[in-house]
Amino acid sequence: MFYFCCEFLEKKNKMEYYYLIIVGILFLLAISDLIVGVVNDAVNFVGSAVGSKAAMFKVVLGIASLGVVVGAVFSSGMMEVARSGIFHPEMFFFNEIMLIFLAAMLADVLLLDLFNTYGFPTSTTVSLIFEMFGAAVAIAIMKILNTPDLTVFANLGEFLNTSRVATIITSILASVIVGFLVGAVIQYFARLLFTFKLHKTQKYFGAIWGGICFSLILYFIVFKGMSGSSLISEETWIFLRTNQGFLLLATFIIVAILFQILYWIFKLNALRFVVLLGTFALAMAFAGNDLVNFIGVPMAGLNSFELYKEAGSPDPGGFLMIGLQGTVRTHHAILFGAGLVMILALWFSKKARNVMNTTVNLSRQESGVERFGSTPLSRSIVKMFVGLNEWLTRVMPKKLNRRITRRFKASKKADQTAAFDMLRASVNLMVASALIAFATSLKLPLSTTYITFMVAMGSSLSDGAWGRESAVYRVTGMFTVIGGWFFTGLAAFTIAFIIGLVLHWGGPVGIVGVLVLVALSLWHTKRIHKRRSEATEKAEKSFLVEKEDVENIHQIASESLGSSLQKMENLYSKTIVALNKESIKQLDAVRHDLSDIREQTKLMKNHLNVTIQAFNEKQLENMHYYVQAVNYLREISFGLKSFIEASYMHTNNKHKPLINEQQAELADLNQRIHTFFERMIQHVSTEKFGSVEETIGYEQDAVQYIESINKKQVKRVKNGSCGTKNSLLYSAILTNTRNILMFSVLLLKAQRDFAVSSE
């Protein structure tokens, strides 16, 4: 900031003011990009340590922060990708180059923030490449259209570095397959060696495995991750390369012996150290490889401005950017500052937790509440692999099959609160950091998101985490995330292309307009994320019972059930009123509110297994009443959904409204339903069931009234006063109302029995 202030005060040329302001905007956008980028990529380097609970969350973040700073300082070798890796800078003038950089950064902030808001991990590398590509195509087309001797089809390729882009995209796509396969293979053999009984096997193999992992991770930190950095002298590099075999062997022997001694004396787990070192290495590789995605473009813009200034500030529309093909100027202070911004985002962003939960959830060992559903594609894939497994079981010798099965049998002594154990975490980190750092040494901006996610998916598959209980949902989740990656490329190109055209046509006015649009978008997505986070926290707090909440189970159950019943009764009443008024707007609002309630009841039911796990054997004797109550609540929501959907479809299709007699009957029925629900909710919420039989009498009165108006409806059908659609709607309303009342009484009795038996 001090640099920009000094430069601004020294300017005498108005055009220098203009482009210095653009450079300043680029770096302001870079700060925002760093924040949203770290939010997206945080899971890449802390997910394994968090999922395996290798250390407290703050300790993991501290180690990752140190890795980010080190990686940021050593990341200058990747900066050339943003300068000349996507297009040929010598084909563009200075003013055109600055518009390309600005369009790419604006598109990047918009896109990453949108993905982070909805919790989907995406690739910052892919977004950068396609944003730069889209912006360059837009400016190149405008340049060609303004040049009489050029045509788009014949000359567009001269402006773009298509061969380099193809190489980068190919390497990224290959990383998906390589990461998955390597992670799956190494995890399979590692599990065969260690089994799930790490408390027994690590005393035999832990030190050797730790030595191997430690040596490989250190190798890629030093020989690959720091390769090309100007902070290490050439003499040092010559010594390291000459003796790298000896240094690796020495590291393996020393670390293995040290781990074994520490285990004998202190029973320290070598895998824990490997996971923490791997977290550091992956954070360092992330910063070294991905920092170009966030500040590479602004630094290229700064280099362009410096070249323009050194040339004497000529006409921006006539100064070709040949100088961008030269050596990258390293600004270590900017790199260090970028690392600090990344650390602050890592510690304080709630969106980072949201993205992290997606990947950890898809790779956890145990089945449970799945975020994704089932699709025909995922079911077909699972069926294929189930058939393949059955075939292998038949052809494999039974003795060998039994031994392998025993090696993959889960241990009851494992930490049930962890998503997976530290053996899988060490494999994830070792494989991912190795592949990423290796690609970085080749100047390939490999996607850390693709690598870490696919390694995690491959290792979880080999580890048996994708069992019959969860396989279809995990496959759906994986394809959903991968589909999001491909959508990233298309969206990044399109957004950057459009912004590039707007900036070219609009000039300063266009820049201000797009900046305002980006600011409004960030503000809007922040509100969306806050609202979604509050709803999720409230739902989980209401429906997920932890061990420390066991003593308050009656209160938690009463509050959650009472709240849900109250909302359902309100929706029932609103539907009757909206149906009689033929208000499609009100019915649509009711449908929207119902979807939220159904999601809450689904969450409550899906968490039943987790809730049951929190209780001891004595308490479990009464838990079946709570399970019954939750199931009945879910059935009530089904009846309410059918009732609301029938009303909505009838009104939306513009069928004839209910006749006056029917409207009066439903209004009377609505009042009876309200009276019954009011008393029932009071019982459930206060846990006072002294007058339950009297309340059930109100339900019986409502049922008898339904029977009486049903008879009247039959007579109306007989004399032709009601049409077919009218009759079908009225019958659906009465049938679903009867079901709602029936399951409501059953819920009331179950909750009463739960309270009485617990006392």
Image (cartoon, rainbow, N blue to C red):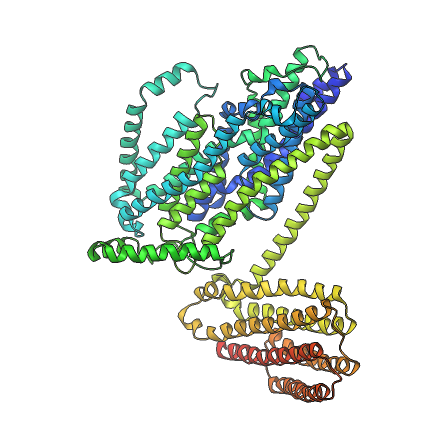
Q: Residue at x 45, y 28 (%)?
A: 440
Residue 109 in which image quadrant: top right
> Quick check: 59 above or below 294?
below
Q: Residue at x 63, y 78 (%)?
A: 680
Return the x and y of residue 567 as percentages of the image width and height.
Answer: 66, 69
Q: Residue at x 69, y 68 (%)?
A: 648
Q: How many marks?
A: 0
- Residue 393 in view in this figure: yes
Judge by depth and name the residue closer to the eye, 369 or 349.
369
Q: Residue at x 59, y 44 (%)?
A: 115
> Quick check: 342 above or below 329?
below
Return the x and y of residue 332 as percentages of the image width and height.
Answer: 55, 22
- Residue 269 in view in this figure: no
- Work out which quarter of the rendered image holds the N terminus and state it: top right
Answer with left or right where residue 176 lies relative to residue 706: left
Residue 268 in which image quadrant: top left
Judge by depth and name the residue closer to the eye, 338 or 726.
726
Return the x and y of residue 371 as percentages of the image width and height.
Answer: 52, 56
Return the x and y of residue 595 as percentages of the image width and height.
Answer: 63, 63
